[in-house]
Amino acid sequence: MPTSQLPALPDRPEDGHKGTFGRVLVIGGSRAMAGAPILSGRAALRTGSGLVQLAFDDLMHTASIAACPELIGLPGANKPATVLGAAKLSDAIVVGPGWGQSPANKKTLLSLLKLDAKLVVDADALNLLATQKAWPATKAKCVLTPHPGEMARLAKAYRLGTFEDDDESRVKVATALAKKTKCVVVLKGFRTVVIDPDKANDVYLNVTGDSSLSKAGTGDVLAGMIASLIGQGMSPYNAACLGVYLHGRAGEIAGQSLGPRSVLASDVIDAIFAAIRAYESGEN
């Protein structure tokens, strides 16, 4: 997909309410990585979601409310049945940011993949999938968002060939992963690659973004943005392409204000509105 053919943002009717604009569930977080799902949740809200719920340890709900009072907790999120119940009510799900790689999390992830749901699979969820001997049974429509290290582990696990972080290998291995899994693949990095498994020759190479995004947490932001667009009604592939584009522009805008050295993931979230405003006005 050429950049000139990126889709329009979802409609925003004036009479809409929070239920109109999508419910996103973020599954992740651990004692050492409480910030990751909060970043994903905040990014989803900034991208237009009507309601965002975080599924992580009850003891961390206070931290999430302090960081962003608009986020909603999920009491009892340590119980898989509670998480799966919330997932069935959601329009889009992010799973993996800061989650950890426990056997219990792996079991929950495999159960999520069997749902009729739309998932953005990120971070530790990808690492858990790399421990599988074969790609699991999947009913959900998924967007996989590996960084190069995660892609190398997935490529080795599923015998996709040696992954080298160069332009040719990035497209080749991302395409192989999309075909293998039947999932949209977003291989992050400079000139992020997005592959649609149904149109594997139609490669989207993103043109936005710079070193302002070279900070921990910016991938969590991207996962939340993509899920938000899916929850508002976009197809997983279109949401991935547009999410990657807007994420890169938000990073650039934050870097122009603060300097690329000083940008934090939270600054990228705060610049999402400006990236969206520029995109809607045609200032690409």
Image: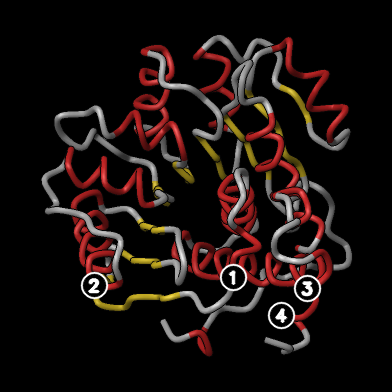
Residue reaching furthest to the front: 261
**Residue denoted by label 4:** 279
274 to 53, vertically: above or below: below
19 to 77, vertically: above or below: below
Question: Helix, strand or loop at disc 1?
Answer: loop
Question: Helix, strand or loop at disc 4?
Answer: helix
**Residue denoted by label 2:** 168
Q: Position of residue 211 (x, y in %)?
A: 60, 65
How packed is label 3: few (under 14 Cα within 10 Å), some, or many (20 or more)?
few
Q: Amino acid at mark 4?
A: Tyr
Q: CA distance from mark 3 to mark 4?
A: 17 Å
202 to 188, vertically: above or below: below
Contact? badges 1 and 4 (CB < 8 Å):
no
Q: CA distance from mark 1 to mark 2?
A: 20 Å
Q: Nearer the viewer, residue 190 or 111?
A: 190
Q: Nearer the viewer, mark 1 or mark 4?
A: 1
How packed is label 1: few (under 14 Cα within 10 Å), some, or many (20 or more)?
many
Q: Nearer the viewer, mark 2 or mark 3?
A: 3
**Residue denoted by label 3:** 256
Residue 5 horizontal side relative to residue 1, left or right:
right
Residue 17 horizontal side relative to residue 178, left or right:
right
**Residue denoted by label 1:** 209
